[in-house]
Amino acid sequence: MRIVHSDNLMIRRYGKLKVSTGRKLFNGMIRNNWKVCEYSERDIAKFAAPLHLKPLGTKAANRHFIETCVNFKPDIILIGHSNLISNKTLLEIKKLLPSIPIIYRNVDALWQKRNVDVINWRKEVVDAIFITTAGAPLKQFYTGKNIVGYIPNATDPAVEDMDNSQKTKFDCDLMYCGRGEKTDDRYPLIVSLHEKLKNKLRLETYGIYGNPPAWSEAYDHILETSKMGLNLNRFEGWPLYSSDRIAQLMGNGILTFVWDKGNMRHFFTDDHVAFFKNEDELIKKIIEFQNNDSKRQAVAAKGRTFYHEHFSGQRITKFMIETTLGLPYSHNYIWQDEVYK
């Protein structure tokens, strides 16, 4: 299998950002023994532009993407958040390589109008779309000519390489990382947790409640030294949706607290994560796991093993390719019923 993979790989950040869905999917494709040509359109635009002014390099980035596809002669083209690549460019590639399917994947939330607009912009020129929200919201992107499906947030053993389920000493008992607004579902909850748990454990939040966000080495350090983590989305209840935070927490063996909304029990049980229905239940379970380390370790370990087995970049990329090409499934993907075609 030969694949051209276009995504924002953030080369120009020089190592400051390490958490990348595109990178985990790339690793998964390599683990599948596929030949993959990476194309980071934003980096190309910046490096090819006069004075490295990215907006001036957009035309060059599009021209070089066509060149890359023609030279590499892929079996599949997979594009992620590569919004500098125009639909005109994709249509030109279809003329030059008419038998090559184009897959578009999107991991942003569907409550963001601008994200829905981007997917609608792409849906007429790609053959398959894969999104990290499931259920009825997917139907709006089905044209009768394309395939629309759900994918979970990927993990990779070279990225989520810690296992806090085997540790007993931590700098932080409970953490949350993620930027937010006061209108988010999670904001009042976090404020209340700070007040009600301040004398019971060490709670740290970053990017919200007055603390700056954490990136790169600082974020890795937080993950490495945290016992438990909150997986809180801006808005809860969207089918099978979570930010990729869930992969970073569960994949690193950090006991993860998850709202019992959005049908996440389709994937997980109480043996994998700590589900909660309301604030009172959340606080009760936080204190319970804080005081019962063996139970915390057991749930976090099973969650980590389950997540790496079912939601690896290797397995997710196989699912996308097999679904797009109409091939028999090589695995029993536990989300394979979430496809419209």
Image (cartoon, grey):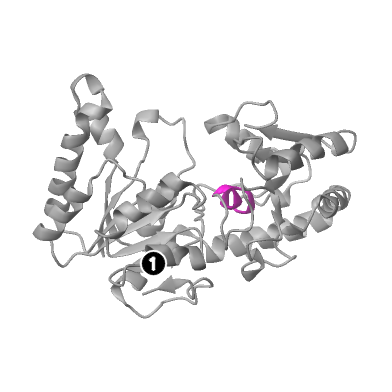
Image side of residue 83 versus residue 60, left or right = right
The residue under the point 64% across, 42% down is 184
The residue under the point 41% across, 68% down is 319
Asked if residue 214 lies in the magenta stretch, the reply is no
The residue under the point 69% across, 25% down is 210
The majority secondary structure of the magenta stretch comes to helix
Image side of residue 154 versus residue 32, left or right = right
**Quadrant location of the N terminus?**
bottom left
**Quadrant location of the C terminus?**
bottom left
Q: Quadrant of residue 325?
A: bottom left
Q: Quadrant of residue 217?
A: top right
The residue under the point 35% across, 72% down is 322
Residue beneath disc 1: 148
Q: Is residue 135 above or below residue 26?
A: below
| x and y percentages locating residue 132 in the rendered image | 49, 58
Q: Nearer the viewer, residue 38 or 208?
A: 208
Image side of residue 15 versus residue 268, left or right = left
Q: Is residue 83 above or below residue 277?
A: above
What residue type is disc 1 on?
Val
Q: Nearer the viewer, residue 113 or 204?
A: 113
Q: Is there any visible trace of residue 150 in the rendered image?
A: no
Q: Is residue 97 above or below residue 19?
A: below
| x and y percentages locating residue 208 in the rendered image | 66, 32
Mark 1 closeness class: few <14, some 14–19, many ≥20 residues within 10 Å: many
Q: Is residue 50 above or below residue 17?
A: above
| x and y percentages locating residue 172 in the rendered image | 75, 36
Q: Is there any visible trace of residue 173 in the rendered image?
A: yes
| x and y percentages locating residue 216 in the rendered image | 52, 32
Q: Magenta segment, which residues?
A: 244-251
Question: Furthest-bottom residue in view?
Answer: 328
